[in-house]
Image (cartoon, helix red, strand yellow):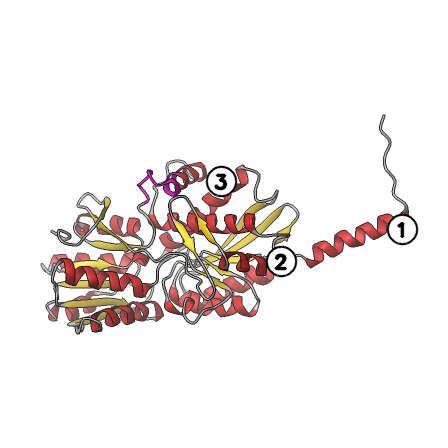
Amino acid sequence: MRGKIILPPMLAAALGLMFSACLASADPGVDPGKIVFGQAAALEGQAAALGTGMRDGLLAAFGEANRAGGVHGRKLELISRDDGYEPLKSIDATKQLITDDKVFALVGAVGTPTSAATQPVADDARVPFIGAFTGAEFLRNPFKPNVVNIRASYYQETEEMIERLTRDRRITRVAILFQDDSFGRAGLAGTRRALEKRQMSLVSEGTFERNSVAVRGAMLTIRKGNPEAVIMIGPYRPCAEFIKLARDVNFNPLFVNISFVGSNAFAKELGEAGAGVVVTQVVPFPEDSSLPLVARYRAALEGLLPGAEPGFVSLEGYMVGRLLIAALEKMPGEPSRQGLLDTIHSESFDLGGVTLHYGKDDNQGMDHVYLTEIQGDGSIKPIATLRLAGG
């Protein structure tokens, strides 16, 4: 029979103090058995499909890692708080995640206005702000050391839109619908920049308020410009409403939407009116299982939510989760917030056929923009050019 090992009182006390000191020195959110991340995003309301999509992708990646034993023995957890896609509510949710929930890092935020409000909060608290679902330029330039982006920027998406419209279709008359806030104005700035590069300008423009679908006035204003194409900068519900109203009055330019729209929810909202609508994407096609990244994502999503529909938003969330896991695995020593940022900013990460490249003063992993088109049956297919789109 084995006897118990009894340590001398002074040695036991010293070891206890050393263990307590180690725990005290660890960054918030790091425990011996887990690392806790926080997400402030729209889980209800007009943009709910975007927040829940990002959450599902993150949880799929974390679940995949946890089933394999976690990262160096630590399981990954996610606490998600709803911000309704409203900046003030997002600030409150972010502060709760940092102060009350004591998360290690903030991940998977959704939106430009909410990120503009909460990234400074994260910066002040020295909390990493990783994988926001936005292509806003302020998260990229000037360089912010606590920020890590996955996706291409809105400037890159709108440049691709204008390049394809002018090269593939020889379109010269372009209008824009945009959400009247920092998100919409980011898309507007990118569109104007791409047009000016080609000595062109918008023929008409219309706006709508965040978290509303009041777009009839914008549609009538835009129609007066007689555009051949309308670029759309907004989430799925108002953009779908705009297109359905336009179809009703036989106003049928080529509609081209930015990735933030949330393609799968967008296609459902549009129904039959979606045929020929184009959406730019910043992640690979989620049906293409020939890509190892996508095959793993689909298996992980099925493991989390059996029968769930794969989509662009949850794939992006999954990629954010995979980046976090890969960086934690590569990080020397115990997990720390600064160590996480330093590791990401000094490495490249192959996620399975898609590589994220980072470097000094470069916090954006991908630059590629993909094209997709919604079909009459509501499905989405990848396309190489816009030559036949909308037909």
At which x and y percent is residue 293?
Answer: 39, 43
Q: Would residue 333 be seen by someone viewing this image from the given angle?
A: yes
Residue bearing the label numbered 2: 28
At which x and y percent is residue 196?
Answer: 21, 73
Say which mark, if any, is on residue 240.
Answer: none
Cα distance between the residues tagged 2 and 3: 23 Å
Q: Is residue 276 one of those drawn in magenta?
A: no
Identify the image quadrant of the N terminus: top right
Establish if 389 lies above or below 67: below
Say which mark, if any, is on residue 10.
Answer: 1
The quadrant holding residue 74 is: top right
Counting labels gives 3
Establish if 187 lies above or below 312: below
Q: Magenta span: helix, strand or loop, mainly?
A: loop
Q: Is residue 239 left or right of residue 135?
A: left
Q: Would residue 233 be seen by someone viewing this image from the given angle?
A: no
2 or 3: tag closer to the N-terminus? 2
Residue bearing the label numbered 3: 64
Q: Secondary structure at mark 1?
A: helix
- Report the span colored magenta: 286-295
Q: Give, as a three-letter code, the residue at label 1.
A: Met
Establish if 182 lies above or below 236: below
